[in-house]
Image: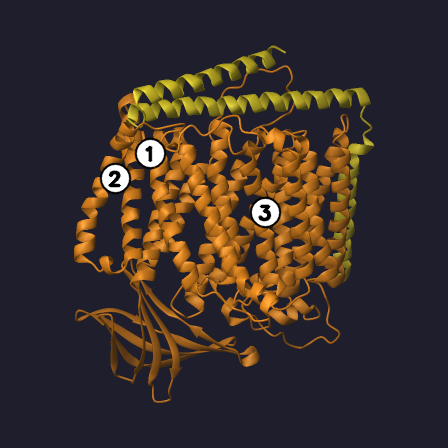
Amino acid sequence: MSSTTLAILVLCAAGLLIAVAVAWPLLLREDPTAALRADREALAADRTRDVEEALERSLAAIREIDTDHRAGNLSDEDFAALDRAERARAAELLRQRDAAAGG
Amino acid sequence: MSLFGRAVLLLALGLAVYALVMALASRRPGRRAWQLSAERGVYGVAVFTTLAMIGMWIAFITDDFSLRNVAEYTSTTLPLEYKLTAVWGSQAGSLLLWMWIFGIFAAVAVYLNRHRNRELMPVVVATLMAVAIFFLLLLSFVTSPFETLAVIPEEGRGLNPQLQNFYMQIHPPTLYLGYVGLSIPFAFAIAALVTRRLDTAWITSIRRWTIFSWLFLGIGILLGAKWAYETLGWGGYWAWDPVENAAFMPWLVATAFLHSVMVQERRGMLKIWNMVLVVLTFVLCLFGTFLTRSGIIQSVHAFGESTLGPFFLGFIVLVAAVSFGLIISRLDALRSQNSLESYISREAVFLFNNLLLLALAFAVFWGTMFPVLTETVQGERIVVGQGFYNQVAAPIGIALLVLTGVGPLIPWRKASPAQLRRRFVAPVAITAIAAVPLLLLTDLSQHWVAGLTILAGVFVAACVLGEFWRGANVRHAVGGVSWPGAVVSMIGRNRRRYGGYIVHLGIVVLFIGFAGSKGFATEADRVIPRGGSAEVAGYTFVNLGSERTVTPHVTTTGVRLDVLSDGGRVTTMTPGIQQFTVDDVRGSKVAIDSSIRRDLYVVLTRIEPGGEAMVSIYVNPLVLWLWIAGFIITAGGIVAAWPARALPRAATAAEPAGTARAT
């Protein structure tokens, strides 16, 4: 087999496979109602994930503030103010997460 | 191969257009299948560009001189390792490499977000594909790497000897990993602006991409410096060359973004600023690619004259106009949730750091473009010398270095004066104690820039190591673990923070390398007869005679020099002159002897038949520390980007089946 023939074969095979793969989701003809529901679920999951990631960041911030205080980087007064604000934020995020989990 | 290459690039182009249209159409509710089809289009673009790259490699390996790209950049005698990397020695080949990496990155970004960011991803895909279309249009219709020659030569012209170097093999791909990687944060920023989802979700999705790209851009710049040092034979590694500057500018702005994004995450501030930085970084990446290819600047790193300039300029203007237009239209939604409470706070330090980085980026931009501006306005090209850059960069660099140590010690929101005194007394005392022997026993006092840099380095190291000490102390006391365990646990609990500190230590080492090599270098030209010797900076170089090595590819004539110091033998060095078989091109083979104190760097400029050698000798202190700094910064970047353990998740009714976490 010549290299030109091989190149054409590779090209045709890759082109065909990719064309089928790209068109496949459209050929499945999903029920419009189910598609809308899946979309809503995906958006809700994104919102929940965003809250969880914000919560992770907030809890990490609380740990960091605590470590900084113990290490002497923060005075008692600064620590109290920062810790109170961050815990309030974490509590709000926890409430949002639990509300989302409750449905 | 030409037909195959052109066909796969055209297929990639068609698929990119399809993916862009489908992605935008999939924004309407209920069109998840359209989005899926668009995403598969992105994977297809990656497959086709990979096939194009493989085709190009095969053409180089098989010496297919029917292709202009192959005939002009390789030869039958070129070793295989260089044939593989000669692909990106040309304008068109390097654009193909750019596009290939971009295709892979776009596919990876889409894959990692396949179950998340339903609102953002269609716009992300559309933005990425718009960039892909631009590059594929260039590769298909303006500068094709698969262009054929009317007359096929029997032998290729070979690869420029300066490019036949290990660091030049890996420097372009590494740099492109950075350049191209920064297009992913840009795509997410555009998506956040278009969809008005301007909270921190888009930032979470790009955090690791940004660190990864910043890291590779930095490593790429260092590898370029190492290549220049080993190959160009002028004894230095950085000359504020326009192409070096082209990579340095986006790196500076990306550094600013990495810091200011923390302020947005922690305090809900600087949202507009962050958007501007992301857009500016990407625009500067394109600008760097433009500078290297337009022919408007003269550089050892640049490709020759080409027709690409106007296309790049048009695309840069389009990207900037659309992006800044979007930012302006979303100003109401980008308002900060908090304001700066005190100028003595971490967010204020980050802001100062940002302003300094941007000022330096602007100065570098000005210096780079000044010759072009003067040529346009006055008709005469006035080149800005290294003196301008050094004068501007030295004070800004030292101020930035100091902030590297100050930032970690100042808390968010505000710091009390008493707290500041407690935190800074030890680092200032250590710096003062170190200053005494450094200023009295060395030449530092006569080189104020180098002196200040090294003292600032001591201060920052004291600040950062103090942070490690205090953090480990807390873990040791609270966790009841051993000291090594405390350090590991401390880093593991806050990888981003301590990874950042490791990077800061790497920056200190880098600056010490700069200070030593820029401030205390010795340079001398000597003629050494066979059996004779010459002395430079306390080292004696003895000419032991010449030697000649011949391979089918290159003939090297070298001179063996014994190096003695304090009566003892240090090393033997063999600098040489290379004569390449193809095209009879000449090159220098620089001899370098590295140690932690200094580099001995010798270039053979001429050798007489009787063995008399004319050499340029450089003694460059602390250069090795620059490369060591690269490893430290890489290690810190990996620690900072390493994924943290996720919290146990609440069971959510809304979660669709089969979703996965990914960033």
Label 3, secondary structure: give it: helix
Residue B118: assigned label: none
Label 1, secondary structure: give it: helix
Which chain appears yellow? Answer: A
Q: Which residue is mark 2?
A: B427
Q: What residue is shown at x 74% (from left), y 53% (from top)?
A: A10
- Gap between marks 2 and 3, in whole Å? 37 Å
B425 displayed left or right of B645:
left
Q: Residue furthest top?
A: A102
Q: Amino acid at mark 2?
A: Pro
Q: Which residue is mark 3?
A: B282
Q: Which residue is mark 1?
A: B409
- The answer to which quarter of the image holds residue B190 is top right
| Pointer 2 local density, CA inside 10 Å: few below 14, some 14–19, many at least 20 | many
- Gap between marks 3 and 1, in whole Å? 31 Å
Q: Circles 2 and 3: CB distance less than 8 Å? A: no
Q: Chain B appears in which tint? A: orange
Relative to A103, is A51 above or below? Answer: below
